[in-house]
Amino acid sequence: MSKIQELEALLESYDGSIESRYCSLANTVAFLKTLLNEISWIGFYLKKDSELILGPFQGKIACERIPFTRGVCGDCYSKKETINVDNVNLYENHIACDSETCSELVIPLKSKSAKMVGVLDIDSNSFSRFKDEEIEMLEELVEIIGKKLF
Ligand code: SME
């Protein structure tokens, strides 16, 4: 089974309720984590009113609310595009939830009507962790997640 087929099978159980959406997002995070190495944190931030709120994740405790104007997450949400940060120390707007984080990838999460609904945030304790091929694969998976659940 390909990664896409595995993900689609996982999302099959979504029943349209908010509880089921959180359940699917939680399992999705666990699934994505199994595909990646050298990852310190992975999780969703979801739009609520005028900010992003922490959703299902795996890793250390993280900040719960991020304004659209703050952090790599806020920038990704506002620009509606993936942001790959090779060295978070050089990214002025970065929010340091964990001082050990070295690089970070944030991918926009869009609904089936192409509305921004949140972001997927992935952190690593290695610099320049995220490369083009893997980023493209993750973007494809996040697109499927957004279209199925929102
Ligand atoms: N570093 C993120 C904040 C979230 S934590 O990394 C989990 C940012 O700059 O938006």
Image (cartoon, rainbow, N blue to C red):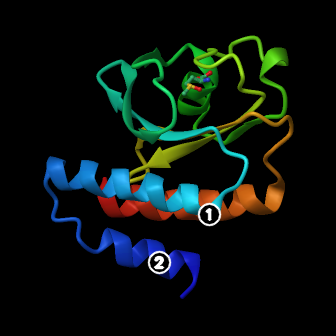
| Residue 121 visible in the displayed image | yes
- Between discs 1 and 2, the one toward the N terminus: 2
Q: In this view, does 70 lie to the left or right of 109?
A: right
- The relative height of residue 15 versus residue 5 in the rendered view (above or below) is above
Disc 2 residue lies near ligand 1 with CB under 8 A: no
Q: Which residue is drawn at 62% across and 57% down?
A: 139
The residue sitting at the bottom extreme is: 1
Q: Which residue is drawn at 74% across and 60% down?
A: 134
- The relative height of residue 38 versus residue 119 in the rendered view (above or below) is below
Residue 135, disc: none
Q: Residue at x 53, y 31 (%)?
A: 77
| Residue type (three-letter) at the residue carrying disc 1 | Leu
Quarter location, residue 108: top right
Quarter for ligand 1?
top right
Q: What residue is pinned by disc 2?
A: 6
- The relative height of residue 31 versus residue 6 in the rendered view (above or below) is above
Q: Please state which of residues 58 and 117 is positioned toward the viewer in this rendering.
A: 58
Tell me the SS state at disc 1.
helix
- The relative height of residue 4 versus residue 1 in the rendered view (above or below) is above
Q: In this view, does 97 lie to the left or right of 50?
A: right
